[in-house]
Amino acid sequence: MNVESSIQGFFSALPYFIVLIGVLIFIHEGGHFIFAKLFKVKVHVFSLGFGPRLIGFKRGETLYKISLVPLGGYVKMLGEDPTEEIHPEDQGRAFGDKPRWQRFLIVVGGPFMNIIFPLFLHFGVGLTFQEVIPAEVGLVLPNMPADNAGIQPGDIVVAVDGEPVHAFTDLLAAVSPRPNQKLKLVLRRGGETIEQELIPDAMEVPKMGIPVFLDEKETVGRIGVTLGYLPPLIGVSHPSSVAAQAGLVPFDLVTSVNGTPVPRFLDMEQKLVAAAGSTVTLAVRHLKPDAKPNFSPFSDQFTDQVDTVTLHLPDGLTSVGDLGLDRALDYVAYVTPGGAAEKIGLKRGDRLVSLDGETYPMGQIFVALSKHPEKSRVLAWQRNGEVFERSFKPKFIPAGEAGELGIGRDTYDNGFWGLAGERILPTAVPNPALVGGALKYALAETWGGIRLIGIGIKLLFQGKVSLRSLGGPIMIGQIAGQAGQQGPSTFFWMMALISLNLGILNLFPIPVLDGGQIVFILVEAITRRPISRIIKERVMLAGIAMILLLMVFATWNDIARLVVGLG
């Protein structure tokens, strides 16, 4: 990143930042304002921002204004200034005149609105999900419960334990909470209805909605099916196989069989099995020699030239495995020069076989390696029918200052990559549970945001997350800009998360914040007498000093991030 692009990024993010901050301040101060009006407290000023007024108007007894400094806002109520004279007609309308329970609700109203606002945001986003992807099985992972139960690509799950399943997300929601528990699935295969019992495997995965770098795990149920079909990207298992003898190599992309397009691996397999005993012609594009991760766009990774390959299919062909063809999932597509994998002799086109003697698909090998990346493991692979086995340890790459600032993390590089290709999703169907689904989505996303913030705070106090990762206005602006450029749903999701942050942090028992005011009210309720003005003023000054120091520290971190990013 250079200075010019950084300046351009600032101005492109500015409108999103203004909208984000403006809305959240309005929601927060609106919470205080609504409860103050509800309990007939006189409100002098409702301000978005601090400092000199930019624009404003007076309606009734309240001045509504937008002020110069947009980093907050306030509701000025009668009696908050101890030197203010209270006229006879306003007797009983000051904030301090109200019962403690009313003052408590006025103070807590701001954080409360910030915490419930995300429910409405997420519900609105949920209502845009007019269509859903059905629970159609695109890929069955080997040696997993679905594979062992005979579930096949193309099967559609319509119920789990008697509960209807409309979308693939419904299937995940039904299976995830029930590891090691027997489930009864009802599937539709063509015109046939099939019932199948299975027990999901228990798997430890990063907590849903929690960034991977926070390293928070949970145990969930998995049956080994994935959404989306694989493209006809092939592996070739043995040099003496029919496929290899015909000239096919790993990562060839088959585009047609006898002139008929085959967009999915499943389509290719069905065509070949149906043509058993005959000779067929495949149209094939080869993976470019210089193709590198992240292999995007997918189509550009292959040669423009389309070659023709003739296959003589044996009688009794039941699967493409009989031809030596395989999905490309377990084959190595790229090896980092000088990396850990190259050092042990791994090459493009090798097929991974096992890790520490256990047979896994490549995806699960990556997961297993990530659990204990600091340890040496035994990796085995196959090349031209020969099996190789070597001790393997991923390369450690420290994040350094970027990690402390929260813009990078320590990583372990395996030094090899697979290539599954773009998943081909089933045709979307109308959402039969639009409103109910939107409500579930809103509740789940809001709870996920609260949990994420709670984990972040916990790790901060435990010292597992550096204080230098704290961010201020610049960081919020950058996040708002990035989210806004990704689309409305991402921007609203980020707005919801920051709203929850604002609501929860304001409940901290720090003077100046709403939580500090709540503590004052609780102390008065316990002692049954008001706290002296002098004590309040001194505590408030200490709170202001704390907040100013925190803002300076966070802004310094923001500047450091820019410097590190520009470097």
Image: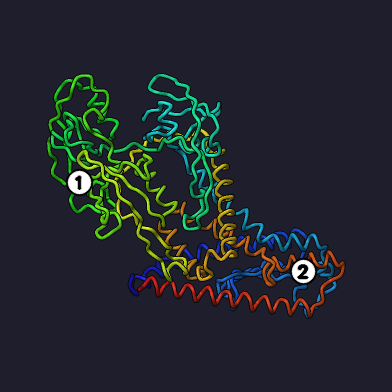
Q: Amino acid at mark 1?
A: Leu
Q: How many labels sit on residues?
A: 2
Q: Position of residue 10 (x, y in %)?
A: 41, 70
Can you say which quadrant of the picture contains the N terminus?
bottom left
Q: Nearer the viewer, residue 563 or 140?
A: 140
Earlier-in-chain disc, 2 versus 1 = 1
Closer to us: mark 2 or mark 1? 1
Q: Position of residue 90 (x, y in %)?
A: 81, 70
Q: Is residue 378 visible?
A: yes
Image point 17% across, 20% down: which residue? 277
Image point 73% across, 70% down: which residue? 77
Considering the numbered disc 1 on the image, is that residue within a helix, a strand or a loop?
loop
Q: Quadrant of residue 506?
A: bottom right
Check the image and report above or below for 270 versus 138: above
Image point 35% across, 56% down: which residue? 394
Check the image and report above or below for 367 versus 518: above
Tell me: 565 left or right of 38. left
Check the image and report above or below for 385 versus 183: below
Can you say which quadrant of the picture contains the C terminus?
bottom left
Considering the numbered disc 2 on the image, is that residue within a helix, a strand or a loop?
helix
Q: Which mark is residue 287?
A: 1
Q: Amino acid at mark 2?
A: Phe
Q: Which mark is residue 520?
A: 2
Q: Nearer the viewer, residue 431 or 350?
A: 350
Tell me: 399 left or right of 449. left
- Mark 2 Cα shell of 10 Å, populated few (<14), some (14-19), many (≥20): some
Tell me: 97 left or right of 111. right
Q: Position of residue 252 (x, y in %)?
A: 20, 41
> How many angstroms separate mark 2 from mark 1 (CA)?
69 Å
Tell me: 309 left or right of 188. left
